[in-house]
Every structure is written in C-alpha cells, then in structure tokens.
C-alpha cells in the first residue's frame, strides 16, 4: 500500500521513516522542513539502527499530496479542526486515515469531517524527539497499538499492521479503540502534565518519592475514569507502566517540549475529553482536573519568564 505522513516530526518522522526505509511508497508532508528534507533527506538515529533516507518524496502542504491508500496524521491535535478540508483533494471514499496522536475522541471528530473515510487510532509507546530539521532521534521503546473506530474496518488495519511489522516496528491491533486510548492516557495524563508543571523529565519525576507517589495517585484516578467508560484497566497495568518508566531512558514528554518552545499544549483531547467522559458516568477526577486547570493557565499566558 501507499502511505502519506502528515507531520514529519518525532512520531511521523520515525514511523514514516521506518516504512520508507523498508521501501514502502511514502510521501511526507514537512511544512517547515520541506526545503531541507528535499535537499538533504531524513535522518533517523535509533538504538534499533540508524538510517538516512535521501531523495524521498516530500511536499510542503497537505494539498500537494498524491492520492494514497493510507494517510497517517502525526501532527498535534490542535490542528485537527480543519483537517478534512485540507485532505479533500488527497482522499476518496476508500481512503484510510490513521491518527498517531495523544488523547481521547479525535477519531470521531475526524470522522465527522470525512464521513466516507475509514478511521483508525494509533497509540505510540515511544520515546522519540525531533532534534533538528529532518533529524529524528529515537531514544527508547517504539511499540505501536492500533484500533479501528468501526469494527468493519479491522481487515485493512491488519494489512497496515503487517506493513509496520515488516518495517521493524512492534505492532498490534486492539479490538477496542476506547480501551486502547484510555490505557495510553494512564501514562500521558500524569507524565505529560507533571513534566510541565514540575519542569522535570521522567527520571526526575520517578526518582522523587513525592512526585512518584503523585503519578501513581493520578494513574489510579484515570483508571476510575476508564472503568466508568467500560474499559478493563487493572492495577498490574499501572504497576507495569511505573516500572517501565523507571527503567527507560530519561525523557521529556512532548507536552513539555511544546511548552518549552512556547507552543500551545494539547489539552482538549488529553484532559478535557477524559474528564467529560468520566463525569458523564458520575465519576469525578479531581487530581486530573486540577492538573488540567494548571496547564490551562500556563497555556493562556502570553509571556513566560
């Protein structure tokens, strides 16, 4: 199948780069890095093997994409509101859209914009950063879990999974998108938000007894929200995430990098939607709400010292 990568950053650059490095036809959208990548290619450094792709297909805007089988969106969710209009010339009723984004509820919102497309969600368990134009550094992890918005689309999702596996990516398909999204929120909600509020990376957060206990408490609260939404989240899942984070390479989550670079943080899908869904079932998430309100304040600040 042919692929398009919208957002050639830490996520799209890595996963799209792995596909292209395995000779799958991939076209990259790289708005700010277009000229550099066009001339110099895409470089990925990874503990699984470094590679440098030259002469790759790259365009500066979504409207410049050719028609492809699978569109992979790895931009920030803040840019989703008009994605359907931008994709109009590149997709048809048989198109497949995979969202490699963080949060809850993005797939339904994109489906409303492109009702004829087949929509999938991808949960990336990875430590990856963009270090410069056309330069991605993969630090640790890298597994990908995917799920379909509609059960009838599972067959094509398994085909996409096989392409990722062929490219050297550990990939699986889940039968429940909501379950997979809430499971990823167990990690994203505490670590993304606290890394900003505490100005700390994962190692610093886990090595301090106060913040490590706070992380666990927030995870248990997220679990309550997940269970209220009909998801199967267990305490051993939480303990496994805590143990895995303690041993992984020290990492600054994407939200901290956005904040440090004076970019708007992704709060709607990662905090607002989970709080709203839990509240609809009568479950309150006070610690998550407080963290969200702190981040909302920081997001609204025009000048940061």
Image (cartoon, rainbow, N blue to C red):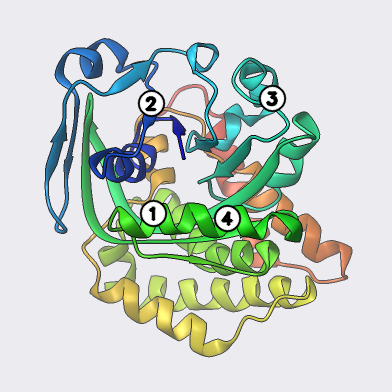
Residue 200 visible from this viewpoint? no
Q: Earlier in the sequence, mark 4 or mark 1?
A: 4
Instruction: Look at 52% across and 17% down and name the residue there.
Output: 62
**Residue 261 location, x and y as percent?**
35, 30
Q: Earlier in the sequence, mark 2 or mark 1?
A: 2
Q: Furthest residue to the bottom?
A: 236
Instruction: Look at 55% across and 40% down and name the residue there.
Output: 266
Q: Quadrant of residue 32?
A: top left
For marks 2 and 1, give the CA distance: 16 Å
Q: Are marks 1 and 3 in contact (CB under 8 Å)?
A: no
* The C terminus sits in image quarter: top left
**Residue 67 location, x and y as percent?**
55, 22
For marks 4 and 1, give the CA distance: 11 Å
Does residue 15 sit above or below 208 in this rendering?
Answer: above
**Residue 265 location, x and y as percent?**
51, 37
Residue linked to disc 2: 28
Residue linked to disc 4: 157
Q: Earlier in the sequence, mark 2 or mark 3?
A: 2
Helix, strand, or loop for circle 3? helix
Residue linked to disc 1: 164
- Tag nearer the camera, 2 or 4: 4
Q: Are marks 2 and 1 in contact (CB under 8 Å)?
A: no
Name the one closer to the observer, 285 or 230.
Answer: 230
Q: Quadrant of residue 185?
A: bottom right
Residue linked to disc 3: 84
């Amino acid at each position: 199948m042919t692929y398009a990568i919208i957002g050639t950053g830490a996520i799209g650059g890595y996963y799209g780069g792995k596909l292209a490095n395995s000779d799958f036809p991939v076209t990259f959208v790289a708005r700010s890095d277009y000229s550099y990548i066009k001339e110099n290619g895409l470089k990925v450094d990874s503990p699984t093997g470094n590679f440098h792709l030259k002469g790759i297909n790259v365009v500066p805007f979504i409207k410049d994409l050719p028609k492809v089988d699978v569109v992979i969106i790895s931009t920030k969710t803040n840019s989703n509101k008009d994605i359907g209009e931008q994709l109009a010339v590149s997709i048809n009723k048989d198109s497949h859209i995979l969202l490699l984004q963080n949060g809850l509820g993005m797939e339904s919102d994109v489906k409303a914009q492109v009702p004829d497309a087949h929509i999938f969600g991808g949960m990336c368990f990875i430590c990856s950063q963009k270090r410069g134009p056309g330069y991605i550094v993969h630090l640790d992890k890298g597994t990908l879990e995917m799920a379909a918005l509609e059960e009838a689309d599972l067959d094509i999702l398994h085909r996409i999974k096989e392409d990722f596996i062929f490219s050297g990516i550990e990939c699986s398909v889940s039968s429940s998108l909501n379950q997979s999204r809430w499971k990823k929120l167990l990690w994203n909600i505490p670590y993304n938000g606290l890394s900003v509020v505490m100005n700390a990376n994962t190692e610093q957060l886990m090595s301090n007894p106060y913040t490590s206990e706070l992380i666990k408490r927030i995870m248990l609260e997220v679990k309550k929200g997940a269970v209220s939404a009909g998801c199967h989240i267990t305490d051993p899942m939480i303990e496994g995430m805590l143990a895995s984070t303690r041993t992984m390479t020290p990492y600054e989550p994407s939200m901290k990098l956005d904040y440090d670079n004076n970019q708007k943080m992704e709060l709607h899908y990662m905090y607002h939607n989970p709080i709203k869904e839990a509240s609809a079932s009568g479950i309150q998430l006070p610690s998550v709400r407080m963290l969200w309100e702190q981040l909302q304040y920081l997001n609204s600040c025009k000048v940061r010292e």
